[in-house]
Image (tube, helix red, strand yellow):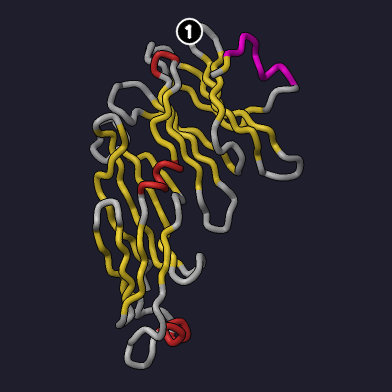
Amino acid sequence: MYYYSYDFRANRQQPSIVASATGDVNGDRIPDHVFLTGTKTPDSPFTQNITLVVQDGRTGRYMSTPLQENAGYNPTLFLGDFTGDGVEDILISITSGGSGGIMYHYIYSYLNNTPRLLFDFNVYNGQYQYQVTYLDNYKVEVTSLLNNQKYIIDISNRGADYLNEIYDPNGKLKNPIQGFVNPLSGLYPVDFDSNGVFELLAYQKIAGRYNADALGYVLNTLGWRNNRFTLVNQNVAIFGS
């Protein structure tokens, strides 16, 4: 963590502000100013060196926290209470720019002006793993390894050309096929209980033989339990026809 005793916005050598929000994030009931700063690429929306900066609303002091993944597109901020302590936390979202639509997400608490990482998308992606297996009779089985839940997706409404590449006329697989589930492609704050405390709704795309072969999404609802985000609810959403 770094401290600034001057207004970085007045120094042209400093990165520019790419996102901003206002709210009490340190718990003293005085609104603080929260920024994402970054170095913009000329003639491109790509931003590098994205950094979280918080200005204490009472003292005016700046505190800076570097991000592990600090380059991407459309960095955004959301302030909301995710832990139930009555103090707003900081949700950071950055688009990776890759073809898979993968997003970088962090949630920080700044309670008592001490940065604490509550959510790291890399940790989430490592925990939430899946198996996607094509079955006979135009079915795909998605298994969530974390909670050992299985879901069956009916793909019989896909086009004949698609199905004929995979199945014989009797609906039997010509060859074993494994699909995959992408890392996080969206993390959205939702107050499901309308109690002022936000849960997280995480989206992960289910893909078949290749990334553009989308079969649906795994939707995980996460809530703050026992000092960490845990799985509260899980669904699989599919596309209609």
**Which residue was labeled with disc 1?**
58
Q: Which residue is drawn at 74% across and 22% down?
A: 13
Q: Which residue is drawn at 48% across and 22% down?
A: 22
* Side (left or right) of 191 relative to 54: left
Q: Please, which residue is most extreme toward the top here?
A: 59
Secondary structure type for disc 1: loop
Q: Please, which residue is most extreme toward the bottom here?
A: 169
Q: In which quarter of the image is the N terminus?
A: top right
Q: Nearer the viewer, residue 190 or 138?
A: 138
- When the figure is inspected, residue 128 is found, relative to residue 107, above or below; the finding is below
* Side (left or right) of 69 relative to 197: right
The picture places residue 145, in percent across and down from the top left corner, at 30, 55
- When the figure is inspected, residue 208 is found, relative to residue 93, above or below; the finding is below
Q: Nearer the viewer, residue 27 or 192?
A: 27
- When the figure is inspected, residue 3 is found, relative to residue 116, above or below; the finding is above
Q: How would you rate the neighbour count of disc 1 (Cα within 10 Å): few for under 14, some for 14-19, many for 20 or more?
A: few
In the picture, residue 195 is in which quadrant? Answer: top left
Q: Quadrant of the C terminus?
A: bottom left
Q: Nearer the viewer, residue 95 or 147?
A: 147
Residue 11 among magenta residues: yes
* Segment colored magenta: 3-12
The picture places residue 94, in percent across and down from the top left corner, at 54, 41
Residue 229 among magenta residues: no
Q: Which residue is drawn at 62% across and 9% down?
A: 5
Q: Which residue is drawn at 48% across and 7% down?
A: 58
The picture places residue 142, in percent across and down from the top left corner, at 32, 64
The picture places residue 34, in percent across and down from the top left corner, at 51, 23
Q: What residue type is labelled 1?
A: Arg
